[in-house]
Amino acid sequence: DDPFDNVRLDVSNLPVFISLAFFDRSFVTDPTQAEEAASSCKYSVAANRNGVVTNSVLGGSGGIPPQIFFEMLATAKEAAEVSLKSLK
């Protein structure tokens, strides 16, 4: 078997997970472990380079007000697009 005889997989539409941590009235994107531990809620969003959300997970003991939740979702989608476009 020739190790250089291979097929390149098309991963151009695979999603990335973007994590956000929510605090009282604000949130941070890509939180550190300390920020996650101090947050009341963590929200992770998987989106592809076109901004299509393929999965999301909400965790923690707190809740997120609807207006901030949608702001967090938009931020995660934008961060995913930027991250994936930089991988070209």
Image: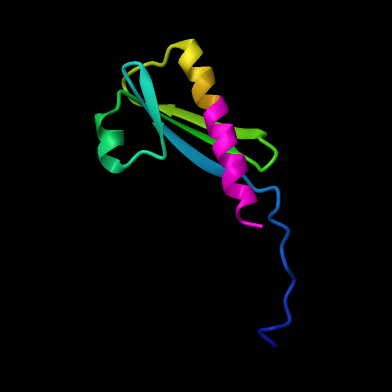
Location of residue 5 in the rendering, given as x and y in whole percent from the top left corner: 73, 82
- Measured as percent of width and height from the top left, residue 55 is found at 58, 34
Residue 24, placed above or below residue 55: above
Question: Which residue is pictured at 49% across the width and 25% down the height?
Answer: 72
Quadrant containing the C terminus in the rendered view: bottom right
Tell me what residue is drawn at x 39 percent, y 26 percent: 27
35 or 58: which is nearer to us? 35
For the rendered model, the colour scheme is rainbow
77 falls in the magenta region = yes
The answer to whether residue 38 is above or below residue 26 is below
Which quarter of the figure has residue 4? bottom right
Left of 19 or right of it: where is 39? left
Name the spot of residue 23 as percent of width and height, x first.
Answer: 32, 22
Image: 25 above or below 49: above
Q: Main secondary structure of the magenta part?
A: helix
- In the rendered image, residue 37 lying in the magenta stretch gets the answer no
Residue 49: x %, y % from top left: 67, 43
Q: Could you tell me how many numbered marks the image carries? A: 0
Q: Is 53 situated left or right of 22 in this image? A: right
What residue appears at the point 48 percent right and 30 percent down from the top-left corner? 57
Q: Residue furthest top?
A: 66
- What residue appears at the point 67 percent right and 34 percent down from the top-left corner? 52
Q: Quadrant of the N terminus?
A: bottom right
- Left or right: 29, with 3 as reference point: left
Residue 10 horizontal side relative to residue 56, left or right: right
View extreme (bottom): residue: 1
- Magenta region, residue range: 74-88
